[in-house]
Amino acid sequence: MKKLDIKNYQKEKGQFVNANGAEFTVKPVIAQEDVFTLHANFVEVEPGHFAYGYHWHERNEEVFYIISGTAAVQTKDKEITLHAGDAITFPTGPEGAHVIRNASDKEKLVYLDFGSEHLPEICHFPQINKMLVVRQDGLTFYDEPAK
């Protein structure tokens, strides 16, 4: 980060994402060009939708802090319900696999997604047999190698 900055999720414009069945809006807290060791984004998910898809990270840890709404977080072992004020941590590796969805049929889910930013990074999406390689200059999806 290059400067002190204040952001409010209600005032920020976001980027709508619709990919692999996921529908959500990302509102950066830290501008992408200023991300070096930490990322932070407000994420908004409408009722009935999920964000990003079920995945795990090889290098980066994540934390989700629920601002408003009700979240259902699928982990490797179980589904966990979270409410405003709750936070959940995700370690690296398959043990930290997760996907978050809006568990409400009326209220928008808003959460803060923040964590370490070590590049290059590889995210694995086991349910669709894909991996995402994240580099400073962009993202590329690949098929997972055959086992």
Image (tube, helix red, strand yellow):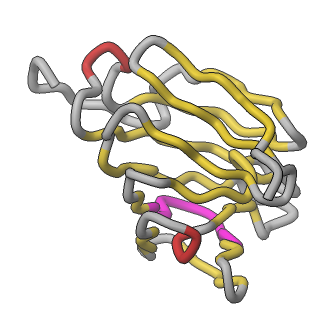
- Image coordinates of residue 56 in percent, x first then y, are 58, 59
Q: Which quadrant of the structure image shows residue 8?
A: top left
Q: Residue furthest left?
A: 3
In this picture, residue 40 sits left or right of residue 26: left
Q: Which range is magenta?
A: 64-72
92 shown above or below 146: below
Q: Nearer the viewer, residue 64 or 38?
A: 38
Residue ID at (71%, 88%): 78
Residue 71 lies in the magenta-colored region: yes
Residue ID at (87%, 64%): 105
Q: Nearer the viewer, residue 86 or 19?
A: 19
- Image coordinates of residue 5 in percent, x first then y, are 18, 26
Q: Which quadrant of the structure image shows residue 61?
A: bottom left
Residue 123 lies in the magenta-colored region: no
Q: Nearer the viewer, residue 86 or 8?
A: 86
Q: Residue furthest front?
A: 147
In this picture, residue 128 sits left or right of residue 76: right
- Image coordinates of residue 144 in percent, x first then y, are 76, 45
Quadrant of the snapshot with the N terminus: top left
Q: Which quadrant of the structure image shows residue 103?
A: bottom right
